[in-house]
Amino acid sequence: MVQIQYARNFVDSLGVDVNVVDWKGTLGNYNRETDTISLNLRRIIQHQKRGKKIDSFKESLTEYIKIIICHELGHRDDDHEHRTLTDLINEIDENNDPKFYLLDDFCDEVKSRAISVSVEKEVYAWRLGKKYVPTGLMDKYNKLNEEYIKEREERSAKSIEEMLDAKKGLAKILIEKELMGLT
Ligand SMILES: [Zn+2]
């Protein structure tokens, strides 16, 4: 594919020494062990065409490739240790009574913290990738990253709500058990 050469040339023009390969996975990925950016060019082309159709963004294919590469370079420059959702929930469970899950305010707080943890890595990549974005492309870069992060937030909100429902169920059982113990 001619696009892979285009992607490599772009990375060279930034003066960054990183491998760029085509793959069959997500649109873009950075692997630290092999110092490689992988691009699913077939899907990138499909997405870009679809984006044009619904008029949600009007990047050309080459701009779209550049934007994805800048985001992946952001991951590459990110040496921050990010907590996982599991880390956060474990930490909350260690410090709080399980019955707190029956309180709406507590759940809202857990939900908003969990959502930000779930996109933290992507927000860092977005910010750190900015320094590679060519002049004139920053608005599109920001818009695409915002859309992408919003999408991920919505997806994780759903799974977090499911988890909170399960926690609520457990809290109820706990209270029932306690009540039975009292009678
Ligand atoms: Zn990313």
Image (cartoon, helix red, strand yellow):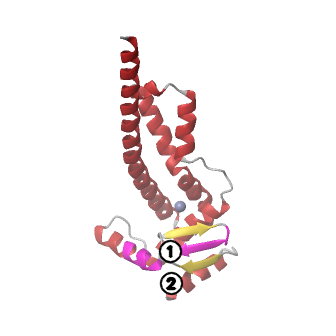
Gap in Å between the C-alphas at discs 1 and 2?
A: 8 Å
Q: In the rendering, at what x and y percent does residue 21 appear? A: 57, 80
Q: In the rendering, at what x and y percent does residue 180 appear? A: 36, 17
Residue in the image at 33% along x and 72% along y: 50
Question: Label 2: which residue?
Answer: 3
Residue in the image at 66% along x and 66% along y: 32
Categorize mark 1 by other alpha carbons within 10 Å: few (<14), some (14-19), many (20+): many
Q: Amino acid at mark 2?
A: Gln
Question: Label 1: which residue?
Answer: 65
Q: How many marks?
A: 2
Q: In the rendering, at what x and y percent does residue 171 appear? A: 40, 28
**155, 85: nearer the viewer:** 85
Q: Is residue 115 visible?
A: yes
Quarter of the image with the C terminus is: top left
Q: In the rendering, at what x and y percent does residue 79 appear? A: 69, 56
Residue in the image at 39% along x and 47% along y: 159
Residue in the image at 29% along x and 67% along y: 54
1 and 2 marks in contact (CB < 8 Å): yes
